[in-house]
Amino acid sequence: MDRKELIKKFIDFFKSKGHREIQNSSLIPENDPTVLFTTAGMHPLVPYLLGQKHPQGKLLVNVQKCVRTDDIDEVGDETHHTFFEMMGDWSLGDYFKEGAITNSFEFLTKILKIPKEKISVTCFEGDKDAPRDDESAEIWKKLSINKIKFLPKKDNWWGPAGKTGPCGPDTEMFVNNVEIWNDVFMQYNKTEEGKFSPLAQKNVDTGMGVERTLAILNKLDDNYLTDCFLPIINSIEKESDKTYGKNEKDTKAMRIIADHIKASIFILGDGIVPGNKEQGYILRRLIRRAIRYAKDLGEKFSVEEVAKPVFEIYSDYEHLKKNKNKILDELKREEIKFLETLEKGMNIFEKLTKGKKEIDCKDAFLLYQSYGFPVEMIEEECKKRKIKFSIEKFEKECKVHQELSRTATAGKFKSGLADESLQTTKLHTASHLLLAALRIVLKDKEIIQKGSNITPERLRLDFNFPRKLTDEEIKKTEDLVNKQIQKSCEVIRQEMPIKEAKEKGARGSFDSKYGENVSVYTVEDFSKEICAGPHVKNTCELGHFKILKEESSSSGVRRIKAVVE
């Protein structure tokens, strides 16, 4: 079975069960300041899992593109990926455990034709916070699945994403002891006091990874041999004159290149460019890591050629087709820039090791982190010069920095998924007013949101505009927003078909992600935006709006940071 066939079977099955297909969301979370990328199919649905009504109804299904960056250094084995696709279905207060488990069983056995004898499951064993999930186990037994294990919270419990919020037990499905699917039952809310109280709206959230499922169905031990990766691997073999699977070092390098180039293409496709902060930094790291390993495979290696099969594999993503040339140009530009950096790094290497018998582990880490030297390259150059290099000391230094990085990330994103605090809600509404004000002040109706990041401390809005704003334009924009706040305008939410929303003049910069029905937020005759929320009820709740900074984000895109006080 190939990728497109699997996805079609999944979507069609759940449509036959009354689910509505929702569009694939951007990799850049629109309403969530707490993570850099969309990390799971449920991520864009957090407001609806918390109780907001979804315009498409209570039963939903889709395949969502995702990026996870926690394990970049783990990529290189048979199963780790930075970019992946997650098939998911949701019940928002409709059916619960019996409906979810029955659907999962039917899809696995009737549609994917997996013999039930090969299926085993795990359920939550219970603890002081919640009882053992005997209900799920009994449903599985009725379906003649008897290989059931009860496991603790670390194995069979989801959430909350932050310190508080929706959470609950899950049941995981395995085929020949390899996990294939996970049904999460959000039935509790964890409070500030650490108590788990039952939720009024009980939700089902399921996740099935495309790459892993294809490997299982095609009896492969290596995800990189599925059609999600094989054309890229074949291209790498051609560029490098190396054979995949022949030796461990080259095979690992090929996997890293294939994964990182694919992830980079999707991130570039969603409007991010390489940089030194947040998503741009991750993108730069992925591209440069791929180039680093490509260099190990051969001097004539072309990253651009390796990238081309990605567009064929994922031909169902229209935005990749549309932006193909731009994406390839950006990859090439970053490759040229990085090769220049590597050259500078060689000069630094010469200075750091001149007259020395051993390279300091901190110096080695500097070459690795700042100049992109793979550890194998450091070892090779040291060997040439008969300089001692301790891989153990180097790895110890790496671990120190990884821990610092994780601590910083945990601090930055400690609020978990979808910070729904009052201050964040205020700033979200303020961003709508800001966008409308910019169109008026700059006399440009085509201005749209190109990116957004909102924390409880400030809002950040990226918008298309070709030049720096003048001080006068910034002041006029600020004043116009404050005028709407002082008028105490009601913020009205309406659900309507997307066609009607557009006819009424509603704006939305992510049209492709919306289904047939959308939520439209209107502030009098000033702002009308398609959005997933959250918002205040009246602009008078916002306080005073102040622009802190206006700067360039990327070519043709400006960035404003602002607060409400």
Image: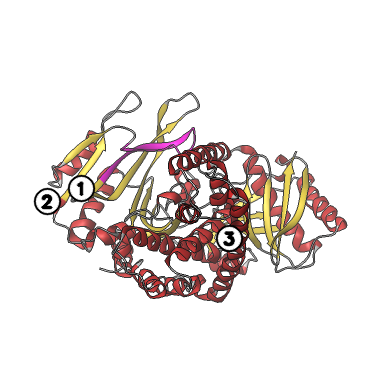
Q: Is residue 383 above or below residue 443?
A: above
In the image, is residue 160 part of the stretch drawn in magenta?
yes
Q: Residue at x 73, y 68 (%)?
A: 445
Q: Mark 1 = which residue? A: 177
- Give the position of the N terminus as an image quadrant: bottom left
- Give the amino acid type for the residue marked by disc 3 in the picture: Leu
Q: Residue at x 56, y 36 (%)?
A: 411
Separation (CA) of disc 3 from disc 2? 54 Å
Whether residue 523 is visible to the viewer of this picture, yes or no, is no
The disc at residue 117 is 2
Separation (CA) of disc 3 from disc 1? 44 Å
The disc at residue 353 is none
Q: Residue at x 58, y 73 (%)?
A: 329
Point out residue 114 in the picture as x, y percentages from the top left corner.
17, 58
- The secondary element bearing badge 1 is classed as loop
Q: Mark 3 = which residue? A: 342
Q: Residue at x 46, y 53 (%)?
A: 383
**Closer to us: mark 3 or mark 2?**
3
Are the residues flagged by discs 3 and 2 in contact, CB closer than 8 Å? no
Q: Return the residue nearer the eye: 192 or 382.
A: 382
Look at the image and give the residue range highlighted in magenta: 155-172
Apparent side of residue 97 relative to residue 391 in the rendered image (left or right): left
Point out residue 532 in the picture as x, y percentages from the top left corner.
55, 53
Q: Return the residue nearer the eye: 349 or 414.
A: 349
Q: Between disc 2 and disc 1, whose residue precedes? A: 2
